[in-house]
Image (cartoon, helix red, strand yellow):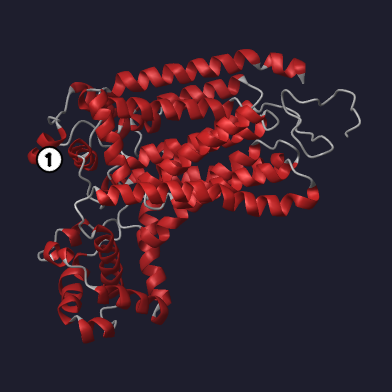
Amino acid sequence: MARASVRGMWPARALVLVCLLGFAAALVANWPGHFPPDAIYQLAQGRAGLFNLWHPPAMAWLLGVADRLSPDAAAFFVMDAAVFFAALAALALLGEGAWLAVLAAALVAVSPLVLVYQGMVLKDVFFADASLAAFAAIGWAGRLWRKEAARGILILLALVLLTAAVLVRQNGAVVAAVGAFTLAAIAAAHSPRVTRTGVFVVGGVATLLPIGAAAWLAAGWFAHHSDHQPERARQWMALEVYDLAGAVRRDPALPLPVLAAHAPSLERYIRDVAAPRYDPARIDPILKAPGWDQRLKHPNPWAWTQWRRIMTASPKLYLQTRWAAFWQVLATPRITACAPVLVGVDPGDPRMLRAAGLSARETDQDDWDGDYAASFLSTPVFSHLVYAAAALVLLALAIRDAARGRLELIATAGLLTAALVYAASFFLISLACDYRYLYFVDVAATAALVQRLALGRQETAATGDGRSAGVGSTAGRPRKRRV
């Protein structure tokens, strides 16, 4: 194992260098960051210190901090890209080190999903990067478990990153839950066999508690500094009307008895206005329909009741409607309708641009970024299905090697599980097929592949107590009697 460690030293150094060069390339290609409409809206809130809860306000707050640190809030995109490349290097360095992994990391760095996407100021990109870094920290906590100080720092870092993931993405809680029980699984693997189940359950719950408490306190603070609009109720109503419109579009004779009895105007709106405009790829045609803004100002509680009634009375129809929307975000069969590339600074709302302190921008550099990314749209580079399939294969390999004693690969298994569960959660909530929504699946599979290649032909034999026999272990040495 010592000889293997020496052999992997130069590839490991080269991999770190590739990640540093990739980070520098992303800064050069995207400076000072690409701001689509959502980012402009959030930056304006962050500068004002008054938040609207339609989007997660934590993202707006972070952009406000970045704006105070640098012009055009460029500090945010620099931080975000740094988190991604640090996480990629950290996950890969859990392996022995192999030149094939260096080549893979270089290809990742020049991929438009990294070179261009890391310059897009989007909550989905930051969520993916923070989640990736959280599992990298968990993996290294598993590697350095016996070093209490290092383990404590890494666990704290993982908790901070998982909390950030919860705060910047509405369904980020599923990733935090998987992360908490991944850390608990590593702790259980280092415990005596008779206590492992208890350690796993108690450890997972205990890890979730500080994440939940921090997220709850932050949510309360943001609500106190918000415009106090009922945005969550509005979001739910948008989903309810979207699903009801899709169901009526599939079955025009579908009865809506709750709305017919208690909200007949909303029933007529769904049948006559929303259903004809229904598009499984995105809700935008309904959002732009006449009268929608007025209805959204005052969410109708009967829409919720009718929505639940459809689930129980017509489950097949509900599932068909949901699957149609989910397939669009998962497979993106019409990828150009899914906003796959967003570069420059969007000029659509001059008033909001002024509030954000930005000017509309479309430079030659922005055009190059957009053209470069667009040239890959019809390739597997922009295919969530390809990355999801790779994630399933890599998950099976990580579970196998973790069972053989590479306990830090429990973190890799957790990362891939979190990405797949996160993707599955869109079956219930997807309203649009925007490519960035499942970006986490892409980067999780990519990072896990680089790590898999970095493992090389490393032995995965376990010691007698189930601990890792990886680099730095006592594998191959005469065993001492344990006390």
Q: Which residue is denoted by mark 1 in the rendering?
A: 352
Instruction: Tell me which corner region of the image, top left, top right, bottom left or bottom right, holds residue 123.
Output: top left
Q: Quadrant of residue 59?
A: top left
11 left or right of 67 in image = right
**Residue at image location 46% in from the left, 43% down from the top:** 441
Q: Nearer the viewer, residue 393 or 350?
A: 350
Q: Is residue 190 left or right of residue 380?
A: right
Q: Quadrant of residue 68 in the image?
A: top left
Quick one: 451 or 317, which is closer to the camera? 451
Q: Nearer the viewer, residue 43 or 446?
A: 43
| Element type where label 1 sits in the image | helix
Q: Is residue 223 left or right of residue 473?
A: left
Determine if residue 452 is in view: no
Residue at coordinates 30% horizontally, 57% vertically from top-left?
Answer: 431
Q: Amino acid at mark 1?
A: Met
Residue 397 x, y percent position in the rendering? 66, 41
Q: Quadrant of the C terminus?
A: top right
State the residue at coordinates (63%, 49%). Answer: 203
Residue found 64% across the figure and 53% down from its top:
202
Quarter of the figure with the N terminus? top right
* 10 Å crowding of disc 1: few (<14), some (14-19), many (20+): some
